Image (cartoon, rainbow, N blue to C red):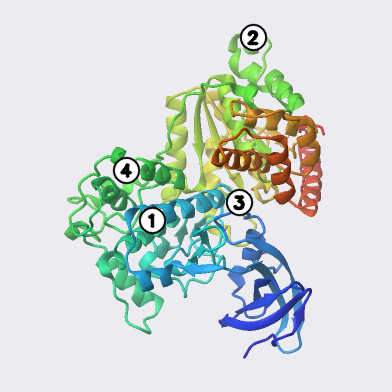
């Protein structure tokens, strides 16, 4: 029975009808005062699984949705609370109404798709996923029924149904798994691991379905089978390589499918950008190594077989070592005070070893860049490496994941070993709170071994020629032991860009593009509260419009786009980060470190 009645109002929205429901959530079509349609998803808190709630007893996926504003992701509008006499407290979220057709319905109506049509849909999905993954968020439920082909934008694909969105999971999922379609899930999800690669596996499985109008391995699951039975059927089917002989596509695309849907139900793509690059040039995809024979799969580790070697490979960190070559700090708009401080107090000591030894200056061990989303923390770390000229390793949480118990600890040790072998090396850990969560928090107990391994490796690693940069949007979630002297020595706040920085960002992004007379100062005034990624999006959107009409980018065009694009971060979120900044500064002072955060 529906909790909300037709014509009932929640805020400015009027309920039109119930669309679907489960034990803890109901989805409605609603309309605002202009009779524009929207979706309302209502969560009954007392029935919502505890693992879907955060520490404040709020529905975690709603908070995640509020951070995901992208053309290929269902649009978050607003959220709120509702109280009902019978079911008690509820939370709801409003999203845009899907004006289009589900990919599943299109396939049912028209059958398989052409390679060009399928690649277009795939690129749209990957653009949205890449945006999510950059924020350490994963969709975890990519199927034909969760892809909408929007009529408003000429068939652009959008990811919908965000009820399974989570951060990196390495053990116990923070969402309900009973309603997942295992035919589109990587085998590693069956042991509780959800990351970049598991999302990409689902995308490639979707690619196969678009081209054939059937699921990979032609898996049939009996109606009424529980999750345990479904997993058993799927894993059994995947013991043999996927047959692509009847696919009338170029060999490059076949190799992409083989790479994404490995014989053991895993994915060889580490992130969305790698798959996007292969789709743009499928002929560059290297021949894969010969798949393991089916009878080898499922053996126990021990003498006389290859599984022990496989497990050894799973403890090796496959992170690329990049050369620190580039323009360095010249590519960073504004923040001159911060760049000057880092040059004088960090880079100087790292680069001039003789003078450091003469004055008995100890090299710093590492530093944490923290602050709001989209303000360029990872970009700043990369440019820092270019400024030093040192080798550079960018590490995401999924890079250190392992399907073996304590396999991640081996990867952590191997990562630092490789960095030392190629010293001097800067290691950048993106979204560091996912690597070293506070061990006293609920749900982080299973990562205690990994946190302990990090503590061991971070201890005075500068003496081994390693400098660590960590980035985080939630530094308060990092284990306090990591932020002590001798491990992460310095805390650096990367703030919202001020007017000067925004002005320089517009100049940098417009540089080299065909432009009319542009007033960057005026653009900076109009974008108060906008973050670096917002400004990059505005300029790129203007460039696309100008290119389509074969004309220069104009001031008028940029201002029109600014008026239609809202800041990614609300004023409330900015205030929360300012409070967090003060909290971290207080912690830093208690630890008797010098204050080095950027002064606004």
Q: Could you say which is closer to the camera, residue 404 or residue 14? A: 14
Per the model, the C-alpha gap separating discs 2 and 1 is: 61 Å
What secondary structure is found at the residue carrying circle 4? helix
| Circle 4 residues within 10 Å: few <14, some 14–19, many ≥20 | some
Q: Nearer the viewer's eye, disc 4 or disc 3?
A: 4
Q: The N terminus appears in which quarter of the rendering?
A: bottom right
Q: Residue at x 61, y 83 (%)?
A: 18
Are the residues tagged 2 and 1 within 8 Å (C-beta)? no
The quadrant in which residue 456 appears is: top right
The quadrant in which residue 15 appears is: bottom right
Instruction: Read off the residue under disc 4.
Output: 282
Instruction: Read off the residue under disc 3.
Output: 437
Are the residues tagged 3 and 1 within 8 Å (C-beta)? no
Instruction: Read off the residue under disc 1.
Output: 117
* Mark linked to residue 467: none
Q: Residue at x 78, y 33 (%)?
A: 592
- On screen, residue 579 versus residue 568, left or right, reads right
Residue 203 visible in the current orientation: yes
Q: Residue at x 64, y 56 (%)?
A: 440
């Amino acid at each position: 029975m529906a909790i909300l009645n037709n014509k009932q109002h929640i805020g400015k929205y009027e309920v039109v009808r119930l669309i679907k429901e489960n034990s803890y959530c109901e989805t409605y079509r609603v309309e605002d005062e202009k009779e524009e349609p929207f979706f309302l998803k209502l969560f009954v808190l007392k029935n919502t699984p505890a693992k879907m709630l955060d520490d404040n007893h709020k529905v975690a996926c709603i908070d995640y949705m509020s951070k995901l504003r992208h053309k290929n992701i269902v649009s978050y509008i607003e959220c709120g609370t509702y109280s009902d006499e019978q079911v008690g407290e509820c939370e709801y979220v409003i999203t845009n109404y899907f004006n289009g057709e589900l990919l599943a319905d299109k396939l049912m109506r028209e059958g398989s798709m052409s390679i060009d049509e399928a690649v277009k849909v795939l690129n749209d999905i990957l653009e949205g996923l890449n945006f999510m993954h950059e924020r350490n968020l994963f969709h975890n439920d990519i199927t034909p029924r969760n892809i909408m082909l929007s009529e408003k934008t000429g068939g652009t694909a959008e990811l919908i149904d965000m009820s399974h969105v989570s951060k990196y999971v390495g053990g116990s999922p923070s969402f309900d798994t009973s309603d997942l379609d295992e035919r589109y899930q990587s085998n590693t999800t069956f042991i509780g691991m959800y990351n970049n690669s598991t999302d990409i596996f689902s995308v490639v499985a979707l690619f196969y379905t678009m081209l054939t109008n059937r699921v990979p391995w032609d898996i049939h699951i009996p109606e009424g089978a529980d999750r345990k039975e479904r997993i058993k059927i799927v894993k059994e089917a995947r013991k043999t390589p996927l047959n692509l002989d009847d696919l009338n596509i170029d060999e490059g695309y076949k190799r992409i499918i083989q790479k994404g849907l490995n014989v053991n139900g895993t994915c060889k793509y580490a992130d969305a950008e790698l798959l996007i690059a292969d789709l743009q040039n499928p002929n560059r995809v290297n021949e894969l190594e010969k798949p393991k024979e089916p009878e080898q799969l499922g053996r126990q580790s021990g003498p006389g077989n290859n599984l022990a070697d496989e497990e050894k490979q799973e403890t090796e960190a496959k992170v690329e070592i990049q050369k620190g070559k580039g323009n360095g700090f010249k590519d960073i708009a504004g923040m001159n005070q911060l760049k000057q401080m880092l040059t004088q107090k960090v880079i100087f000591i790292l680069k001039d070893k003789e003078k450091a030894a003469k004055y008995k200056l100890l090299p710093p061990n590492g530093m944490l860049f923290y602050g709001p989303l989209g303000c360029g923390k990872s970009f700043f770390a990369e440019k820092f490496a270019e400024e030093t000229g040192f080798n550079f390793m960018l590490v995401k949480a999924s890079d250190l994941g392992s399907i073996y118990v304590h396999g991640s600890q081996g990867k952590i040790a191997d990562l630092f070993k490789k960095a030392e072998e190629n010293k001097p090396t800067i290691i950048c850990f993106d979204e560091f709170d996912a690597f070293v969560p506070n061990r006293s928090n609920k749900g982080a107990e299973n990562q205690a071994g990994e946190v302990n391994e990090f503590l061991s490796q971070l201890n005075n690693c500068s003496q081994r020629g390693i400098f660590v940069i960590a980035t985080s949007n939630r530094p308060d979630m990092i284990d306090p032991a990591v932020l002590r002297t001798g491990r992460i020595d310095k805390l650096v706040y990367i703030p919202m860009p001020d007017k000067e920085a925004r002005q320089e960002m517009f100049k940098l992004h417009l540089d080299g593009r065909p432009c009319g007379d542009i007033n960057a100062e005026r653009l900076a005034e109009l974008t108060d509260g906008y973050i670096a990624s917002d400004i990059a999006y505005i300029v790129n959107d203007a460039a696309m419009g100008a290119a389509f009409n074969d004309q220069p980018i104009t001031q008028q065009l940029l201002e029109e786009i600014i008026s239609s694009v809202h800041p990614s971060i609300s004023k409330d979120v900015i205030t929360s980060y300012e409070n967090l900044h003060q909290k971290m500064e207080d912690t830093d002072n208690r630890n008797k470190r010098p204050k080095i955060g950027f002064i606004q």
